[in-house]
Amino acid sequence: MKHTAVVATVLLLAPLTACGGNAAAGDDGSTVTVTVGYQSKTINTVTAGTLLRSLGYFEKQLKSLHDGHTYKVDWQDYATGAPITAQMTAGKIDIGSMGDFPLLINAARGKQLGKPTRLVSVTGYNLRGGLNTIVTSPGSDLASLDDLRGKKVSTSVGSAADGTLVRALQRAGIDPDKGIEKLNQQPAVGASALSAGSADALSQFVAWPGLLAYQGKAKALYDGAELDLPTFHGVTAREDFAKRRPPVLEAFLKAQAEATDYLNAHPVGAAESVAKATGLPAEVVYLYNGAHGIATFDPAIKPQLVSALKKDVSVLKAAKLTGDVDVDSFVDDQYVKKALGSDYAGRLALNPPASASEVWPKGASRTQSFKTPAELLAYVSAHKDGVRAAYVPDATTGTLWFADKAVWVADGDELLPFVAPETAQAYVSAHGGARVVTYAEALERAS
């Protein structure tokens, strides 16, 4: 990554750190530094962060401006969206990427401090909400949301994962404030608490649930896609920066679109690249960012996502993290529309690809798709030592999950996978003769 990313050296003049922060910055033909805040391990922002950085597309777009300035990009990696928002409102970050709930806080803080920001594009999204998952420890007896009553549940308050927890509990008839003991923790701390037994469950965003499941440190308890409410990640820019240097912002958005096209055309290569940069297993990155992964990537700002953002405001208000947020004024698609030109309408109309079962063979640069989960199981059974990872879509929500971590149901000749035990049990209850089977039994039945 070091040979492709252009990292700015520390400048003697602090006002040049963010190119929109000072009226004199770059106006005399001097070097202009564009500061981008991103979250390397929030892997549904990679087209505006980790992957984009490694590909060098933004730097190439900036070189093509030919406006008399020399541009450098200062990539700043953060664990969450909160410090990116703090740096943006301080005029030290020009462009940032984060999840939907942090985006709302970004909008609220910017308005509150007189440093407004704007949502200018989208990165990874899931129209049903599958990017967030509630997990519990592998040996836990917890099998449903109702089992969480009185339990300790770790989450990051103000995150989309917390929003999923609140909404899921409410639908289950549980008061999210009194029905559980909520632990406000960063994802890594919550993961450790789950392993140590000091938390009974963990509600988190990508890539934590998939990572912990892959490592054998957790199992899914609730699939966020059961809410059927979109979750997404997006790009926010300081309004003063956007107005002062629109060609620079447009260059970023063109580069983001290029990175998106690269990810869609080379899903395995992109997963390997992100894995190398973040230290995450490539198999986990692919679960979310793969050809049929939980996330779909495109810069277009879909109306469904804006509508979902408006519904999210009430959750943050209830948690007293924001007041009212004017979502319509926060969303500003003029820059991405100009950057993508005639392509924008087509991207806006794109639908997520249909769910499919996939196997990633060892040593292969491409995955293999199957029409049914049973066909995938038959392949895995016949190539047990040659499979790097196997993925199947939940029979109810379509959320992709690891085949060996799914809850399997046998219904006659059909073999159906589910992310969580509660949805599997709901299917069994509605279909006479259907029953939950082990993964080993599912493999045997399919072979």
Image (cartoon, grey):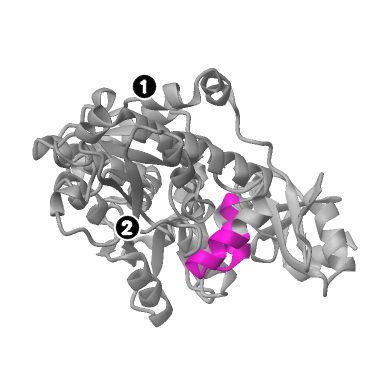
Residue at image location 40% in from the left, 66% down from the top: 201
Few, some or many C-alpha atoms within 10 Å of disc 2 (few <14, some 14-19, many ≥20)?
Answer: some
Asked if the magenta segment contains residue 326, the reply would be: no
Q: Nearer the viewer, mark 1 or mark 2?
A: 2
Q: Residue at x 47, y 55 (%)?
A: 50
Question: Which residue is label 2 attached to?
Answer: 8
Q: Whole-percent x and y of residue 333?
A: 37, 24
Residue 144 picture location, percent across and down: 48, 58
Dot 1: element = helix
Q: Is residue 398 visible?
A: no
Q: Seen from this angle, which residue lies furthest left? A: 113
Question: Could you say where residue 301 lies in the image, as x and y percent from the top left?
Answer: 43, 28
Query: What residue do we see at 42% from left, 27% from top?
Result: 336
Our reading of the magenta stretch's main secondary structure is helix
Total labels: the figure holds 2
Q: Which residues are magenta?
A: 272-289
**Labelled disc at residue 334:** 1
Tell me the quarter of the image containing the C terminus: bottom right
Name the amino acid type tagged 2: Ala
**Which residue is nearer to you in this view: 160 or 258?**
258
Q: Locate residue 422: give its quadrant.
A: bottom right
Three-letter code for the amino acid on which mark 1 is drawn? Gln
358 to the left or right of 144: right
- Can residue 90 be seen here? yes
Looking at the rendered structure, which numbered label has been put on residue 323?
none
Residue in the foreground of this view, choosing between 35 and 176: 35
Nearer the N terminus, badge 1 or badge 2? 2
Q: Find residue 323 and report its horizontal and vertical position in percent.
A: 14, 36
